[in-house]
Amino acid sequence: MTSAVLSQDTRAVGRGRPGVRSTLTPGASLGLGIAMIWFSLLVLIPLAAIVATAGGEGWHGYVDTLTNPQSWAAIKLTVGQSLLVTGINVVMGTLIAWVLVRDRFWGKRLLDLVIDIPFAMPTIVAGLVLLGLYGPRGPLGINVSNTPASVTLALAFVTLPFIVRTVQPVLAELDADVEEAAASLGARRLTTLRRIVLPSIIPAVAAGAALSFARAISEYGSLVLLSGMLPYRTEVVSVRVLSFIEGGDRTSAAALATIMLGVALFVIVALDVIQRRMARRG
Amino acid sequence: MTQRNRFLALAAAALAVPAILSGCAASSGASSDSDKLSVVGFSVLKTANEPVISAFQKTGAGKGVSFTTSYGASGDQSRAVAGGLHADEVHLSLQPDVQSLVDAGLVDKSWDQNATHGILTDSVVVFLVRKGNPLHIESWDDLVKPGVKVITPNPASSGSAKWNILAAWAHAEDAPGGSDAKAQEFVTKLLHNTVALPGSGSDALASFLAGNGDVLLAYENDSIEAKAAGDDVDYIVPKDTLLIENPAAVTTDASPKAQDFLDFQLSKQGQTLYAKAGFRPVISGVKTDVPGANDPSNPFPKVSHLYTIDKDFGGWDKANPEFFDDTTGIITKIIAGLNIGS
């Protein structure tokens, strides 16, 4: 998909600006109009409103938020845990996708179905389930509730499907012939994996990682019961934002939200750059 | 061709925007039907209100009145009404949440000028403990002993937590040799023993029932409800605690039936039904058995030292900014200054 966009871009540049316009048929421009209105009403205008609210107190709204040690601790915890969980997902998600595509085993269909449950479940229910299993009365004897590990656990649970679902179709499309050819030319398994398989799936992994990270930094529901919401220890940004709103301090809430918006944008762009690099190389 | 495309895109915009706006208007328009009452309350009332509503519908004034109800965290509900959620009556956890509706012009200034000063339900702060009270928790001082794990909702986000924390403060200040400094020290110790600060009273109860902590600071009515539901818990009413007072008000554009409903809620019949759900009556002469109470035939034991927000803290108008302001509040500062749970 990325490469298609890229080649279109180069064509458009080659023909100059009028060329871009002429590709729009009447139907297409109607579609574009509707898409833009929908997108603006749902996303652009509300986002602009948040940034505007946060800017209500000028720069010092942001400075106050960032220098408040409790908010800063929440930002560090949220970003750190989200990166950690995204890292875990890159490994585990790719592995699960691999198993689901390449291996045949009993219960594969069921596993394939169950992967989506963290998507479908209300997150508060997810929190309750995790608390039942890994809480003080869990049957496994592991109690992570009210510790930073509970944040890792909850985030890992709700973000699990992202990388699995982005990598799975790419792996399924990957032609086994190419790998066989590599093998017949004397490449060892690891070399084949590194030179053939990884380059093809890395764009998908990066896209999934971006989704996973974005989901993780915004998570609230599954943490409500599990994390204990302790300042400096398990209080994530969304909880902090909620406290600001409850306290009637919308400017601080918006400032913190805008900071997280910036973080999310930065990570998504970074992952997109990786994706493009890999796509170009492949 | 290009011009036509632009025209089409603009036409799509022109068609879509009014359609969406009129959709919004339609949903907020239908409000002045006098036989429909919209009650917006804080979360605990969900089960308590059902019998009250059906009893009201059996009275002359309530005949044919239908209800829509909405329950949630008190502050959220107050903001929702301020933000346009239609309400004929609001019944919230604490006075500042009604005050913000007065400020928004949605509730009349004179809302608290009745026999109960605007209060519809009462409760007290109690300790919910594990069945049999294995740690022998009896008084506030037991909560700050080393190793006792306390859960309270977070005062930054929960109205019920504000009652809890102020109860602890009042206890320490009232103790022999008590002072502001002593109270601050006591609450700091209490928060040091806190293992979780869930966002709301109901989240805190869920966390406690899942096995977290030794003591949950809770409303007496919540504790009675939990016991009545068969949860493995007991509750202790300490010798000194804070009276929780939940206000209710009709809105300025409410249907006349709303006042009838509020009058019914404050009547002996209404208060008896709330008492059965665990709330302390706000009028005298209500006698009823309360299933789930420690002693169902004497469900609301007299508290020897009952603190009130007006008498001991100078009212919410003073206490709310003094203790819970986002930056300068005493409790906010205590929480910001310690590394809870570590």
Image (tube, rainbow, N blue to C red):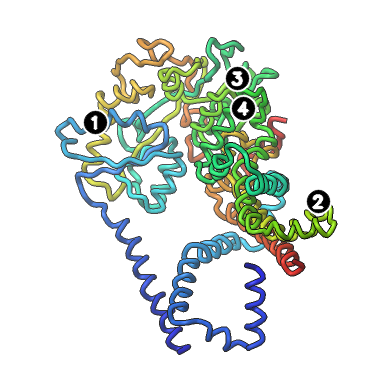
Q: Secondary structure at mark 4?
A: loop
Q: Is residue B211 above or below residue A238?
A: above
Crowding at dot 2, Cα within 10 Å, few <14 / some 14-19 / many 20+, comes out as few
Numbered tag placed on residue B54 in the rendering: 1
Q: Quadrant of residue B43?
A: top left
Mark 4 vs mark 1, foreground winner is 4
Q: Secondary structure at mark 2?
A: helix
Q: Quadrant of residue A27?
A: bottom left
Numbered tag placed on residue B214 in the rendering: 3
Q: Residue at x 60, y 34 (%)?
A: A226
Q: Which residue is mark 4?
A: A135
Residue type highlighted by circle 2: Arg
Labels 4 and 1 touching (C-beta < 8 A): no
Distance from Cα at disc 3 to Cα at disc 1: 38 Å
Q: Residue at x 61, y 61 (%)?
A: A57
Residue A261, position as x, y percentages in the image:
63, 58
Residue type highlighted by circle 3: Asp
Distance from Cα at disc 3 to Cα at disc 2: 56 Å
Distance from Cα at disc 3 to Cα at disc 4: 14 Å
Q: Secondary structure at mark 1?
A: helix
Numbered tag placed on residue A189 in the rendering: 2
Distance from Cα at disc 2 to Cα at disc 4: 42 Å
